[in-house]
Amino acid sequence: MAITNITVISHTFFYLLGVPGLEDQHIWISIPFFTCYIIALLGNSFLIFIIVTDNSLHEPMYIFLCMLAGIDISLSTITIPKALAIFWFNYGGISLNACIAQLFFIHSTFIAESGVLLLMAFDRYIAICYPLRYTMILTPSVITKTAVAFYIRSAGSIFPIIFLVKRLPFCKNNLLPHTYCENIGLAKYACANIQANIWYGIFVLLTTVVIDIILIFASYCMILHAIFHMPSKEARHKTLNTCGSHICVIFLFYIPGIFTFLAQRFGKKIPPHVHILMANVCMLVPPVMNPIIYGIKTKQIRNRVTHLLFQRKG
């Protein structure tokens, strides 16, 4: 009986295809990508500069906002430059290790932003429900320890995915129809069982982002209860206005993400390019809109921006 030796070749190099089906439109698609990336970099960098250089903004609310701006810069920088390389130069080549590194930073940064949004909701809850104890509860030490704990949570929850992906042999197609690497998008090209990747991904989502959403919702239920029991209509309006920017940012971050998650699992009839473009919206919209929203709706930041822009004329 003849024995046939079969050698399984595991790919160590992949090609990101960008937006399959719209290859002829890549140049046009790159225009909003590039524009949004520049706006995100400038807007968030300027926001960080304003908060760091103005002592009156060294409060918990603005420290969390500064953290959010830094995360937004990271999130867009992890994904958009590679997408532009695909659109402009048709260079989607990426090694397996680089692909795994990118998916690690994308997922961990996404969870980190969710965590910061929860911290900002907690900040508003303490400021509105316990205003006299605000400075005693949110001390610099508490802020630092909490921020470090959330960053450790973000990296720690995604770290096992590195090993779950590294163990897989990639002997199928090495062409990835996307602009960036992500866990299941890469794992499904393995010629091995990926149930561990799927279930761990769901576990991480449930124990981080979903819990954050539930706690944010609970915080705002208590915040709204406290606001509508304020005796003064003017006080209610002022307090609601301070929460307005944060609520807008929450919706901008979670709604595209939830829609993309549901579309990927239940929207089988949705064209692939729609899935890919929506996934990129999750990476582009929050970093672009967050500094704009806070710049417009937060009086202290708006006044500081006006002062910086027109101080010479003054």
Image (spheres, grey):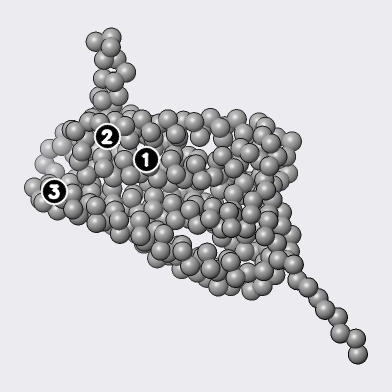
Which mark, by number, is residue 69?
1
Question: Is residue 270 visible in the rendered structure shown here?
Answer: no
Residue 41 in the image: x percent, y percent?
44, 34
Q: Is residue 68 left or right of residue 195?
A: left
Which mark, by number, is residue 134?
3
Residue 159 in the image: x percent, y percent?
46, 64
Q: Are marks 2 and 1 in contact (CB under 8 Å)?
A: yes
Q: Residue at x 26, y 42 (%)?
A: 63
Mark 2 residue type:
Ile
Mark 2–mark 1 Cα distance, whole angstroms, equals 11 Å
Q: Residue at x 31, y 41 (%)?
A: 65
Answer with mark 1 or mark 3, whichever residue precedes in sequence. Answer: 1
- Which mark is nearer the camera, 1 or 3? 1
Mark 3 residue type:
Tyr
Callout 2 environment at 10 Å: few (<14), some (14 to 19), or many (20+)?
Answer: many
Q: Is 135 in front, or is 149?
A: 149
Mark 3–mark 2 Cα distance, whole angstroms, equals 20 Å
Mark 1 residue type:
Ala
Mark 1–mark 3 Cα distance, whole angstroms, equals 23 Å
Q: Do the residues labelled 1 and 3 touch (CB within 8 Å)?
A: no
Residue reaching furthest bottom? 1
Q: Is residue 229 left or right of residue 146?
A: left
Find numbered disc 1 in the image and state the secondary structure of the residue it sits on: helix
Which mark, by number, is residue 51?
2
- Which mark is nearer the camera, 3 or 2? 2
Q: Quadrant of residue 71?
A: top left
Q: In this view, does 305 lie above or below 205?
A: above
Which mark, by number, is residue 195?
none
Q: Quadrant of residue 219?
A: bottom left
